Image (cartoon, coloured by chain):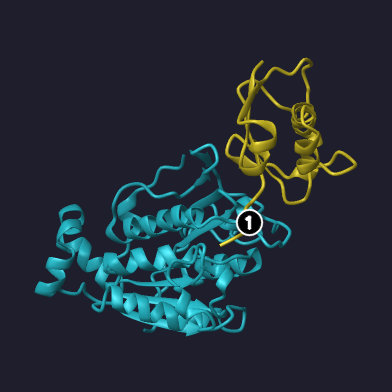
Amino acid sequence: MSIRVRFFARFRELLGNEVIAEPSSPGTSLSGLVRQIAQKNKEGYAAIFDEKGAFREFVIVMRNAKRVDTSEADRVTVADGDEIAVFPPVAGG
Amino acid sequence: MISHARASIIPVAGRGSAMTLSERERERYKRQILLFGEEGQERLKAAHIFIAGAGGLGSPVSIYLAVAGVGTITIVDKDVVDQSNLNRQVLHADRDIGRKKVESAEEKLSAINPDIRVNAIEATIDKSNADRLVRGADGIVDAMDNFPTRYLLNELARKKGIPLFHGAIRGMHGQAMTILPGDFPCLACIFPRAPPAEVFPVVGTTPGIIGTIQANEVIKYLTGTGELLAGRLFLWDGIAARADEIAVERDPGCRVCSGTGPQKRKKEKP
C-alpha cells in the first residue's frame, strides 16, 4: 500500500515536499498517518497539530481532491493510491 | 481536474454589443490582438472588472489589466500609502506616502493607459456597501489581505453569477484560484475557516507573481482563452521555485454554495 502525502507552504519548509507513505497496518487513519510523518520534525508537528494531537483549526487536508473535515480525520481510513495534501491557507495581499 | 465547456461560461463581456476599437487602440494592443484577435480585444474593452484592494496584489493586477485594455476598472481601498507598503505595492511611489491609495492608483493607471476608465473608490468593503460597489462588474478580483472580506466577495460573486479571481500570499508563498459561477468549488469549499490574523511577512515578488497570475486569469476569462484555474488551486513556493496545483472539488456541505445548484449570471441594471 502506498499513499502520497504532499505538504505545502510553511509545512513544506518544515516537513519536506512529499512522502510516499506505506502504513504498516491496514485501517490507519488519515490523522494517524499525517501525525506519524509530522513527528520527524517537532516544529512541523506543532504547526499542524495542537497539544492534544488534533489538527489545528485552519489546517487544510485534502484527500483525492476532496477536503476532509479535520475534526473527522481520525475516522477516515486511508487507502492504497490515496493522494493527501496538507497545507495552511495564506491570507496576505 | 474538472473539465468544462468554455463556450458556455464565457459571457459576451460587458453590457450590450462589443465596442469597436479606435485606430490608436489597434496600434496599442497590436501585439496581443495577434493572440486574441480584434474580437478578443473588444471584449476586454467592453469589460468591467472590480479589484478589491490597491495593495500588494491589487498593484500588479490593476497595472496588467490597465495595459491589457480592460475598458473599466473599479478599484477600492480604504488605506493611505505607508512607507512600509513600498517594498511590494508597486502602484505607489515614495512621493505618495500619506496619500489615499485609490488617488495614487487612479493617477498611475490613467497615466499608464488613458484609453480606459478607472473608478477609484475609497471605502472599506463590508456587508452594507459590497453589493453596490460591485454593481455592473463582470468579475471580482480578490486582492484583499483578510479572509472575512474574501468570504463576503465569494458570497457576492456567487449571488451575482460572476467569477471571483482569488489570490493570497505570505512570505514567499502564494495561492490562486479562479472561482466560476455554476458547478465549481467556491472559496469556502476549500477554506471554510479563516487562518489567524497576523502581520504577515512578504517580499514584493510574491504578490507580483500571484497578482500577475490573477490578471492573466481575468484576461483569459474575458477573451475565452485557454484553461482557467477553476477547480484547481495553484500554489507557488518561491523558496523552492516550484509551482504545484491541487485539484479541488465542490464541498456538498459548503455553507456558501451547497444546495444552490449551478447559477447563471444575473442580469443587472447598468
Which chain is cyan in the picture?
A: B
Q: How many marks?
A: 1
Name the residue at 28% across, 77% down: B116
Image x and y of residue B176, in percent? 50, 52
Name the residue at 9% across, 73% down: B23
> Hey, which residue is sitting farthest front in the picture?
B94
Q: Secondary structure at mark 1?
A: loop
Query: B66 or B229: which is nearer to us?
Result: B66
Image x and y of residue B142, in percent? 51, 64
Residue A51, placed above or below residue B214: above
Query: B59 or B143: which is nearer to us?
Result: B59
> Image quadrant for the C terminus of chain B?
bottom left
Chain to which the residue tagged by mark 1 belongs: B
Residue B12 in view in this figure:
no
Name the residue at 39% across, 60% down: B215
Which chain is yellow in the picture?
A: A
Image x and y of residue B238, in percent? 52, 44
Residue B115 in view in this figure:
yes
Query: B109 or A29: which is nearer to us?
Result: B109
Q: Is residue B38 left or right of residue A9?
A: left
> Hey, which residue is sitting farthest left in the picture?
B23
Q: Is residue A27 left or right of residue B52?
A: right
* Residue at mark 1: B201
Residue B200, placed above or below residue A88: below
Name the residue at 40% across, 74% down: B137
Kind of residue sitting beneath label 1: Pro
Residue B40, placed above or below residue A42: below
Residue B268, placed above or below residue B51: below
Query: B260 or B74: which is nearer to us?
Result: B74
Image x and y of residue B28, in percent? 17, 67
Task: Answer few, some or many: residues within 10 Å of disc 1's Cα (few below 14, many 20 plus, some between 14 and 19).
Answer: few
